[in-house]
Amino acid sequence: QGQLVESGGGLVQPGGSLRLSCAASGSIGMIHTWAWYRQTPGQQRELVAGLTDGDTAGYADSVQGRFTISRDNAKNIIYLQMNILKPEDTGVYYCNVRSTKSPYDYWGQGTQVTVSS
């Protein structure tokens, strides 16, 4: 069974930076889409950034120009570099992939990001 493991969350002051990582392992099939989502209490999970296997990236308007999604194909890891963080970036960040192997849609356990002074 394939799995995703996130790391890199934590507490940071406004204006600071963090880099999240998501490592895919196990029998996960061929991944064709990677993404990061964010969820805050009482809110739906929202898409923050996505990356296709053709390296086309897309971002939510709220993070455009501040966040960058990238991947290391050799290690099957994706990253989310988050710069100029704002308090409204606070939330639990989830890694998601869509692959060719059932259940086709995989989620990590989430990592907490808190932006506060």
Image (tube, rainbow, N blue to C red):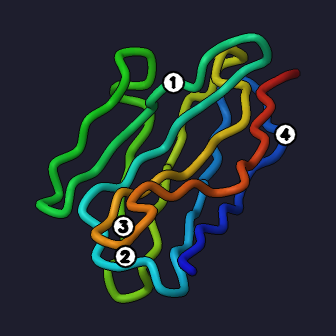
Q: Earlier in the sequence, mark 3 or mark 4?
A: 4
Left or right position of 11 against 58: right
For residue 31, above or below residue 57: below
Q: Which of the two labelled residues, at mark 2 and mark 1, occupies the earlier sequence position?
A: 1
Residue 109 has which mark? none
Q: How much space separates mark 2 and mark 4, taking CA atoms?
A: 25 Å
Give the CA separation, mark 3 to mark 4: 24 Å
Q: Is residue 33 left or right of residue 25?
A: left
The local crowd at label 1, few if under 14, some if 14 to 19, many if 20 or more residues have their Cα within 10 Å, is some
User: Of helix, strand and loop, which one carries label 3?
Assistant: strand
The CA span between labels 2 and 3 is 4 Å
Check residue 71 in the rendering and tell me which mark sits there, or answer none: 3
Could you tell me if the residues under marks 3 and 1 are in contact, i.e. CB atoms within 8 Å? no
Q: Nearer the viewer, mark 2 or mark 1?
A: 1
Question: Dot 1: what SS?
Answer: strand
Instruction: Name the residue located 64 percent from the left edge and 47 percent from the top edge.
Output: 18
Task: Return the x and y of residue 98 as percentages of the image width and height.
Answer: 35, 57
Q: How far apart, in angstroms, are the residues tagged by discs 3 and 1?
A: 20 Å
Q: Secondary structure at mark 2?
A: strand
Q: Nearer the viewer, mark 3 or mark 1?
A: 1
Q: Nearer the viewer, mark 2 or mark 4?
A: 2
Query: Disc 1 designates what residue?
Result: 46
Name the residue carrying label 4.
11
Task: Give the residue type that dot 2 points to.
Answer: Asp
Identify the mark at residue 72; answer none if there is no mark: 2
Q: Work out whether mark 2 precedes mark 4 in sequence or the reverse, and give the earlier one.
A: 4
Q: Which quarter of the rendering shows the N terminus?
A: bottom right
